[in-house]
Amino acid sequence: MTTEWNLPGPIEAYVQAVNAPDADAFQSSFSADAVVKDLGHEIRGIAAINDWARLEVFDVNVKLDVKQAFERDGETIVTVKVAGTFDRTGLPDPLLMEHCFTVAGDKITSLSCRFTEEETHGNPPLQT
């Protein structure tokens, strides 16, 4: 059964752009001065984010399967199962990550990606 998630527009656009893949739609989901923190690496500004996405998302055919989404402390936290053609050596299986988004208006202003071992429970989901 597929679960429908009530994600904020820019986050829904991000997930769809990753899965499409559509680098232009991906770029347009971020503000010009956005910050991405991916497993401890900080990427600032849309040009650097595009470079990061090309190497870490699009070149390795990343696909995101949303498992859970909720809001906490001004962030939208989306737990995703990640697939792709990247080297999986030493990575958990299944590979679950939390994508923690801050949105202002219709753009993502910050994104933090980190490993998680399980879906986070006890938070009200953003389901329709």
Image (cartoon, rainbow, N blue to C red):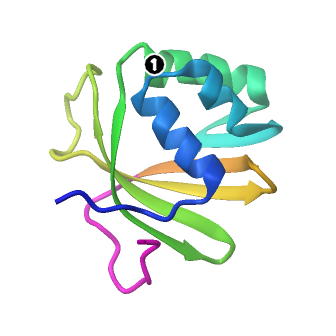
The answer to whether 48 is drawn above or below residue 97 in the figure is above
Q: Residues within 10 Å of mark 1 (few under 14, many from 20)?
A: many
Place of residue 107 in the rendered image (x, y in percent of width and height, measured from the top left)? 75, 46
Check the image and report above or below for 13 versus 63.
below
Residue drawn at point x = 60 percent, y = 30 percent: 26
Give the total of numbered labels: 1
Q: Which residues are magenta?
A: 115-128
Q: Work out which quarter of the rendered image holds the N terminus and state it.
A: bottom left
Q: Quadrant of the C terminus?
A: bottom left
- Viewer-proximal residue, 31 or 40? 31
Quadrant of res 62: top left
Q: Is residue 121 above or below residue 43?
A: below
* Residue 69 sits in quarter: bottom left
Magenta residue check for 126 = yes
Q: Name the amino acid, label 1.
A: Phe
What residue is shown with label 1?
Answer: 58
Q: Secondary structure at mark 1?
A: helix
